[in-house]
Image (cartoon, rainbow, N blue to C red):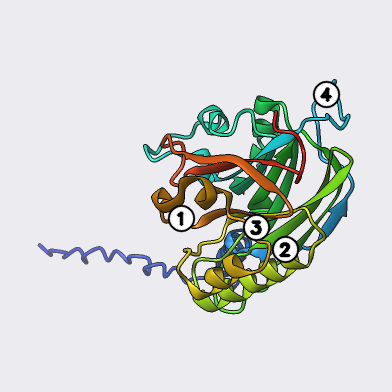
Amino acid sequence: MSHSTASPVRIDHPPAVRHERHPVRGFRWLLVATSLSALVWAGYRRTPCGSEVGTAFSHAEGRSLVDVDIASFRAATFNIHGGEGRDGRLDLQRTAECFRGADLVALNEVYGRHFWEDADQAEILGRETNLDWLFAPSEHRWGHDHFGNAALTSLAVQSWQRFPLPRNYGHSCRNLLLAAFSHRGRTVRVVITHLDRSHDRDRERQLQLASDLFLGLDEPAILMGDMNTMADEPAMKRLLAAPGVGDPLAEVMGQATPRRIDWILTRGLETLDAGLIDTGASDHPCIWADLQLPGDETP
């Protein structure tokens, strides 16, 4: 009897599939990532807003633009910290209470309108206090005029112009707003600014430009805003010592005047009263002064 031996069955396994990364696909992902990074950087990057001029502020419908004949007017300057108080809470109504009743208000650290919002902070505060408003942006970010200064007023506006301040060392964009208002038949010229705090050389140059403009204006004139400069610093000492320059807060408070970086300075105006309001609505106080033209009757 013969025996047959069965040959073992051979099973051939298919070769392992090697997944190779496609160079084009990898390049596409790199291109997408690079493009997104560029968009984020372009949005985040601060760019200065250019110059602009105008002859009017925005105003609510029905508001009279007649030059009201008041013997004195209240000026106020307030760095509002974007409406955020010391408690970290954003409350623009609380911000407005600090200068309600003022006739001329300079605001610093004001935010513009995002694309999902109906109004910038200048408009919100103007409507809340029944004042005309002008947002004066200093920097452009995230596709819109992002941040800057503002002016609110009940006085008749004659003209305004905004122009950027130079910067060579710091990263912040700053500007200067020059506006002219009518009061009792006279033109009151006002300079509003917020100077750089990140680098002394930029700040000193900006203060010199603002000072030269203020001192060169026809009287009456006012310089208002956050100067980021104390009274005992050389540049501010020179400005305070210039002929005809008044410091209403110091005139009223004397030795009790606190150290400050927010200022109202005048030329060709008399001080009736002045003070500061600090409710915690911002990390700065609101400085105010009641002013009148020389020789006018005190109300």
* Residue found farthest to the left: 1
* Measured Cα–Cα span from mark 3 to mark 2: 11 Å
For the residues labelled 1 and 4, the Cα–Cα distance comes to 35 Å
Reading the chain from its start, which is encountered first: label 3 or label 4?
A: 4
Looking at marks 3 and 1 on the same chain, the residue that comes earlier in the sequence is marked by 3
Disc 1 crowd, CA 10 A, few/some/many (<14, 14-19, 20+):
some
Q: Earlier in the sequence, mark 3 or mark 2?
A: 3
For discs 4 and 2, the disc positioned in front in the rendered view? 2
* Residue drawn at (49%, 69%) of the image: 198
Query: What residue would you read off at disc 1?
Result: 260
Q: Which residue is mark 2?
A: 214
The label on residue 63 is: 4
Residue 65's spot in the image, x, y percent?
Answer: 87, 30
- Numbered badge on residue 193: 3
Per the model, the C-alpha gap separating discs 4 and 2 is: 30 Å
SS at mark 2 in the image: helix
